[in-house]
């Protein structure tokens, strides 16, 4: 979920604008998938796969992060049967809300300082 080379340089990787766009796209499609789990599965899965390659916000790059958990659910969403999708829909809605709160709480990046 994050680039390993940044850890070797002892620098915490920071998400770019493109990474944040991929994460936001996943959140929008996750909300749609939570509303109708049988109709909007494929866009959510594709967005989760793309967001899985993005750098996550600082402080949310661990294995138990809400972003990582939502990405894992998204990647496995097509494999679930209809009953399991309905059960996962409430969990997706909760994780999406928590991800939005985390993104809103993150301080804005300054280009003159952070590159």
Image: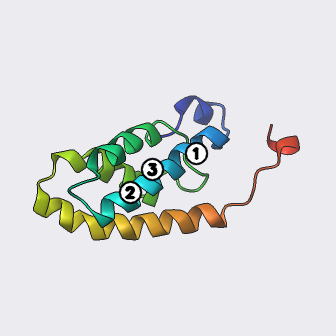
Residue that extends furthest to the top in the rendered view of this protein: 5
Pick whichever, 14 or 77, lies toward us.
Answer: 77
Residue 7 in the image: state x and y as whole percent.
Answer: 59, 36
Splitting the image into 4 quarters, where does residue 5 fall? top right
Above/below status of 114 relative to 86: above
Element at label 2? helix
**For the residues bearing labels 2 and 1, Cβ distance under 8 angstroms:** no
The answer to whether mark 1 and mark 3 are in CB contact below 8 A is no
- Give whichever of discs 1 and 3 has the lower sequence position: 1
Q: Residues within 10 Å of mark 1 (few under 14, many from 20)?
A: some
Label 2 vs 1, first from the N-terminus: 1
* Residue at position x 32%, y 63% in the image: 34
| Mark 2 touches mark 3? (CB < 8 Å) | yes
Give the spatial CA distance, label 2 vs label 3: 6 Å
Judging by the rendered image, the residue that carries numbered circle 3 is 26
Residue name at image x 65 percent, y 67 percent: 105
Which residue occupies the foreground of this view, 94 or 113? 94
Mark 3 residue crowding within 10 angstroms, few (<14) / some (14–19) / many (20+)? many
Report which residue position mark 2 lands on.
30
Residue 68: mark: none
Q: Position of residue 75 (x, y in %)?
A: 30, 44
Q: CA distance from mark 2 to mark 1?
A: 14 Å
Horizontal side of residue 97 vs 59, given as left or right: left
Q: Quadrant of the C terminus?
A: top right
Reading the image, the residue beneath label 1 is 21
Relative to 90, is 76 above or below? above
């Amino acid at each position: 979920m994050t680039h390993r080379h940044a850890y070797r340089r002892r620098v915490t990787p920071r998400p770019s604008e493109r990474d944040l766009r991929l994460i936001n796209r996943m959140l929008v499609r996750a909300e749609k998938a939570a509303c109708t789990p049988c109709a909007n599965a494929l866009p959510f899965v594709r967005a989760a796969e793309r967001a899985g390659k993005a750098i996550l916000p600082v402080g949310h790059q661990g294995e138990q992060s809400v972003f990582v958990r939502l990405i894992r659910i998204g990647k496995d969403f097509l494999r679930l049967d209809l009953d399991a999708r309905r059960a996962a829909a409430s969990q997706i809605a909760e994780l999406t809300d928590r991800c939005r709160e985390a993104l809103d709480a993150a301080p804005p990046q300054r280009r003159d300082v952070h590159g």
